[in-house]
Image (cartoon, rainbow, N blue to C red):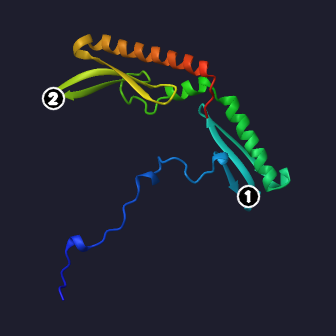
Amino acid sequence: MNTRTSRASKKRPAARSRTSSKKAPHTGVQAGLRHISRQEKSPKAAAGWKVCLTRRGKFMYKPFADSKYGGKTKALNAAKSWHAQMVKSTSGADYVLWRRKKRSRPGASGSGIVGVGRYAVRYGRRRHLLWEAYWQDADGKRHSRRFFVSVHGERSAKARASAARRQAMEELKQELIRRGATFE
């Protein structure tokens, strides 16, 4: 019997799927229970439901104890209605625009303007500097416009990118108002 085994014959454990990362959508949450969780009885808290959500940087929290609302189902219904009321009062076209204008990392692109960045791209062997404006339309599709420093100059390219972003955001606001849509 051969004591040596080839590397190809060894079985490796299955790789973890990419969808199970922290950035994956909430798969374990039911559609009607987003931001709502169950809290069982503990020495410090009563059994019930709790709603936790954040809007415009403000954290909102409210507990719904089973004993106060007359049972598990009634407390859940109260939590759902409070959640719907908060989402409705804090959503709308202005909220969607606020979320899109929010900076993810301070100084990420160095421009100081949300949605406008300075980048270097390679075409063949040459490296070109550019200012890029980027945004998402009302359907969530990403768009961008590039302004090359070699064509417009540094200041003009940045100014044109900023103007393109501003114009796109105004068009987006008008489209969201026209649709009359509210988003969570």
Residue 124 — which label? 2
**Amino acid at the residue labelled 1:** Lys
123 lies above or below 74: above
Residue 17 — which label? none
Residue 44 — which label? 1
Name the residue: 47% across, 46% down. Answer: 23
146 with respect to 76 (left or right): left
Crowding near the residue tagged with mark 2, few <14, some 14–19, many ≥20 C-alpha atoms within 10 Å: few
Q: Quadrant of residue 158?
A: top left
Question: Marks 2 and 1, Cα distance to the nearest angstrom?
Answer: 65 Å
Q: Position of residue 125 (x, y in %)?
A: 13, 29
53 with respect to 27 (left or right): right
Task: Give the residue at the far left of this rendering.
Answer: 125
The N terminus sits in image quarter: bottom left
Crowding near the residue tagged with mark 1, few <14, some 14–19, many ≥20 C-alpha atoms within 10 Å: few
In the image shown, does 14 or 79 lie closer to the viewer?
14
Q: Position of residue 72 (x, y in %)?
A: 79, 56
Q: Label 2: state its secondary structure.
A: loop
Q: Label 1: state its secondary structure.
A: loop
**Amino acid at the residue labelled 2:** Gly
N-terminal of the pair, mark 2 or mark 1, is: 1
Name the residue: 76% across, 50% down. Answer: 76
Q: Position of residue 80 (x, y in %)?
A: 73, 44
Q: Quadrant of residue 10?
A: bottom left
Q: Position of residue 81 (x, y in %)?
A: 76, 41
104 lies above or below 77: above
Name the residue: 74% across, 48% down. Answer: 63
12 with respect to 7 (left or right): right
